[in-house]
Amino acid sequence: MKPSLTPKKIGFIGLGLIGGSIAKAIRQYYPDCTLIAFDKNRETLAFAVSQGTIHISCSSIDDNFKHCDYIFLCAPIAYNTAYLSQLKKYVDAACILTDVGSVKTSIHQEIISLGMEEFFIGGHPMAGSEKSGFVNSRAHLIENAYYILTPSEKVAAEKILSYQTFVESLKALPVLLDYKKHDWITGTISHLPHIIASSLVNFVKNTDTKEELMKMLAAGGFKDITRIASSSPVMWQQICLKNGKNIADILKQYIDVLQQAKEWIEAGSEQNLYSLFETSRDYRDSMPNTSAGPIKKQFALYCDIIDEAGGIATIATILASNHISIKNIGIIHNREFEEGVLRIEFYDEDSAKNAYKLLQKYRYIVYEV
Ligand SMILES: NC(=O)c1ccc[n+]([C@@H]2O[C@H](COP(=O)([O-])OP(=O)(O)OC[C@H]3O[C@@H](n4cnc5c(N)ncnc54)[C@H](O)[C@@H]3O)[C@@H](O)[C@H]2O)c1
Ligand SMILES: O=C(O)C(=O)C[C@]1(C(=O)O)C=C[C@@H](O)C=C1
């Protein structure tokens, strides 16, 4: 049986940040598709039904999961793998079973041992946040983000094509990859940075002065490199356990690099130290910073506001009544804007441009980023 190009029913197991965001995107682009979900958190399911994101909330993996065009496993990785045996009786020839987990080898191995290869295409959207849960999910999360697909060896070519087309229809950018290669690459560009961020934060916590001066004085540099230290401990514990071998090898190489930097500093090696920062600057600056690149462009503007109660609310109302959604809003204080200024972030370029024109029309002083 061929996979359907316009899915009629899609199931979710785990409806948090990623499951919720994919479900919301599907709701937007396939309004006639029935969405069903099981999550261990019943309040999440009730909320998702009340929001109109899903149609049916399931209290377990039950018969509702029969005849799905897609089943998305979106719980923390070890649970996704643990649910496969229960799902086996619900996947049929037309169904594509997929996951969104940050590690792929462990789930592929279980799929092989359960004889479910013809149904499974691993998936991993390279988008996310340090915030978890359905409440933080949004349809735009995967827009313009790379979405890695790791097809099983025995899955039909037409299923792969169909899934690629589906991912594109949700405005993400599918990239096919071997699952073992996936785990090495994400080990380096995602898992290692999370370990660095968390251990750096803990290092500061443990070496701070009695008055917590480090915590007070930590500025942009520290905050930029450690945002992801606020991510879900369960999710990252499971990633480290399941991709442990790769991460340990990568960490070893990275520690050698740190050791080298230490030696250059101790030796006062001017040329090597200059090269360290020059090379990194050039490479970092060469990374695409458009919304289609791995680093998402931020669509923001700054706006002066009078320091009075309700100032932010007035601006939020002007934008909302013109159907412009705000991603983030807050007053910032830095050297450039000593008095403090309102920073408003939007989901896309058009919203930022429209907001700019609108706020100018209302006589606000607005600065483009
Ligand atoms: N957060 C990110 O940045 C990111 C990005 C890409 C992929 N992922 C992957 O997506 C998956 C989900 O991550 P998330 O960020 O959406 O996490 P999340 O915590 O926001 O959501 C997980 C959801 O799964 C539910 N859940 C937990 N245990 C369960 C269980 N045993 N049975 C059923 N439901 C259960 C939780 O109630 C929650 O609603 C993970 O596998 C992660 O590796 C995360
Ligand atoms: O932007 C973030 O907060 C993320 O951590 C997203 C991020 C990452 O880039 O490492 C986290 C885990 C994923 O599996 C994919 C994306």
Image (cartoon, rainbow, N blue to C red):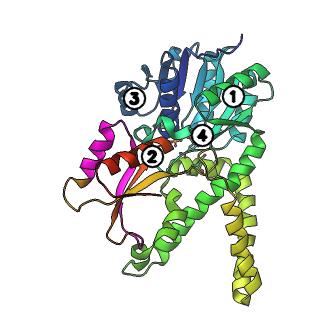
- The residue positioned 46% from the left and 31% from the top of the image is 39
Q: Position of residue 93 (x, y in %)?
A: 70, 14
- Ranked by sequence position, the earlier of labels 3 and 1 is 3
Q: Disc 4 versus disc 1: distance between alpha carbons?
A: 14 Å
Q: Nearer the viewer, mark 2 or mark 4?
A: 2
Residue 353's disc is 2
Above or below for 8 versus 291: above
Q: Nearer the viewer, mark 4 or mark 1?
A: 4
Q: Position of residue 361 (x, y in %)?
A: 32, 47
Q: Say which of 226 and 259 sits in front.
A: 226
Above or below for 135 versus 54: below
- The residue positioned 43% from the left and 19% from the top of the image is 56
Asked if the residue under mark 4 is in contact with the one under mark 3, i.e. CB atoms within 8 Å, the reply is no
Amino acid on which the number 3 mark rests in the picture:
Ala
Q: Disc 3 versus disc 1: distance between alpha carbons?
A: 26 Å
Q: Nearer the viewer, mark 1 or mark 2?
A: 2
Q: Secondary structure at mark 4?
A: loop
The region drawn magenta spans 312-336
Q: Disc 3 versus disc 4: distance between alpha carbons?
A: 24 Å
Label 4, residues with CA under 10 Å away: few <14, some 14-19, many ≥20: many
User: For this view, does 138 lie left or right of residue 95?
Assistant: left
Q: Disc 1 versus disc 2: distance between alpha carbons?
A: 31 Å
Q: Position of residue 210 (x, y in %)?
A: 38, 81
Amino acid on which the number 1 mark rests in the picture:
Gln
Residue 164's disc is 1
Label 1, residues with CA under 10 Å away: few <14, some 14-19, many ≥20: some
Q: Which residue is mark 3?
A: 48
Q: Which residue is mark 4?
A: 144
Label 3, residues with CA under 10 Å away: few <14, some 14-19, many ≥20: many
